[in-house]
Image (spheres, rainbow, N blue to C red):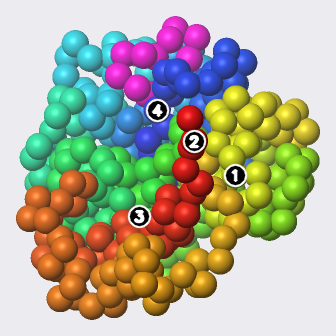
Amino acid sequence: MLRIIHAGDIHLDTPYRRHDDAARARLREAGREAFTRLIDLALERKADALLLAGDLFDNDWLTLATERVLVDELMRATSAGVTVVYATGNHDPGRANYRAMGIDWPKEGFHLVASRQPRRIAIEREGEVVGWVVAAGHQTPREDRDLAAGFPTAPGPEPAVGLLHAQVTRAAAAEQHDRYAPTTLETLDPSYAYWALGHIHQRQEVRRDPPVHYSGNLQGRHFAEEGAKGALVVTLERGAVPEIEFEPLAPVRWETIEPAGLNAAQHLADVHDAVATAFDSRLGGADVDQEWILRVDLRGACPLAPLLASGDERTELAAQLRDDLNVLDVEVRDRGLHPPMDIEAHRDQPHLLGHTLALLQRAANDDTELDRITPTELAGSRGGDAAARRKYLRWLLQDLDTEAGQRLLREPKIS
């Protein structure tokens, strides 16, 4: 049996710029704290190996204080008999003058893989080989080669793990990341019992048999990295189905909530209460010690829409929510608030709004009509076939009937 902890994209010392000083300081500390929890997890689960799938830190942003925490924690792991294998990524490449090569890493039980050439590492327990890790690293910040193509057939007969920082082109959210070390599922050799990948920050199973996984990043850094973050505990045994468990480790969680019932709000206190209710429901099942950064999206019909159109009012509401909900930070956004209106009463009517609603309805249901009104060059479209363009257009057009009603029914300003 081989038990590994798979983590990646830790990005220690990410430079947070959007929040106040206290929130930025807490986020930087949260990255270090998450790494300490990762080492705790490796020791608690008696892992044979800890695999770090690249982007351990953010370029040369690593401070001396964070470097000390990093090295001390890794020594805590290796001193307890955990083998650590760290394959460099695009943010922490391994060429001679980059930061990864200048750190005083642990001398025993630690393996820095900073070359494109795959390296085979035996994982031992009490002097007996219980598994293998084959890893390759990024030498430069812009690795455009398919590093997975150079991996040999897995050594054996013990379970072998492939460790790599790479973009599998068919993985979810792949398009949100730079195309570094691009590869395909077909290239990831099935002789390996498990592929431990980094680079894409969304935790996911890319292939089930044999398993290919992204662990996601250890600590979310912005609202594009919402939800629970942590590492994967993987148990491999010959003849058995791999066991893969997610362990949440991030001290700070980013989350977007959308409160319901705003159509009945008569005072800002009602909006505040709706947000608090939505947050309480999101708390269900979360760690009681979890800290939060919230984004509140206000949309739909609301009598207070004109008031909440003001950035100052939303900023004041955000400050009140931050204090009352006891969270690190809150951002409140107007994502389509509008005064209540009966849009259905205007359908099939012989006026501009009626004709606009009819056009939107035809576009939503008739491919020919949608193609007729689509320009050749479509901003924001990633191209692709006609079906992909139609899907993108219909996403743009959703809820546009309400927007049209809001614009066409507003009272004229009289000077």
User: Dot 1: what SS?
Assistant: helix
Q: Of callouts 2 and 4, which one flags the residue occurring earlier in the amino acid sequence?
A: 4
Q: CA distance from mark 2 to mark 4?
A: 55 Å
Residue drawn at 38 percent across, 45 percent down = 53
Task: Please rate how many residues cluster around mark 4, counting C-alpha atoms within 10 Å: few if below 14, some from 14 to 19, many from 20.
Answer: many
- The residue that mark 3 highlights is 213
Identify residue type, mark 4.
His
- The residue that mark 2 highlights is 414
Q: Position of residue 345 (x, y in %)?
A: 60, 84
Q: CA distance from mark 2 to mark 3?
A: 61 Å
Identify residue type, mark 2.
Ile
- The residue that mark 4 highlights is 11
Task: Please rate how many residues cluster around mark 3, counting C-alpha atoms within 10 Å: few if below 14, some from 14 to 19, many from 20.
Answer: many
What range is drawn magenta here? 57-66
Q: Position of residue 135 (x, y in %)?
A: 28, 48
Q: Quadrant of residue 367?
A: bottom left
Q: Quadrant of residue 113?
A: top left
Magenta stretch containing residue 281, yes or no?
A: no
Front disc: 2 or 4: 2
Front disc: 3 or 4: 4
The answer, for residue 166, to whether it is visible in the render is yes
Task: Please rate how many residues cluster around mark 2, counting C-alpha atoms within 10 Å: few if below 14, some from 14 to 19, many from 20.
Answer: few
On the rendered structure, is 30 left or right of 390?
A: right
User: Dot 3: what SS?
Assistant: strand
Q: CA distance from mark 1 to mark 3?
A: 44 Å
- The residue that mark 1 highlights is 305
Front disc: 2 or 3: 2
Residue 14's place in the image compared with 308, above or below, is above
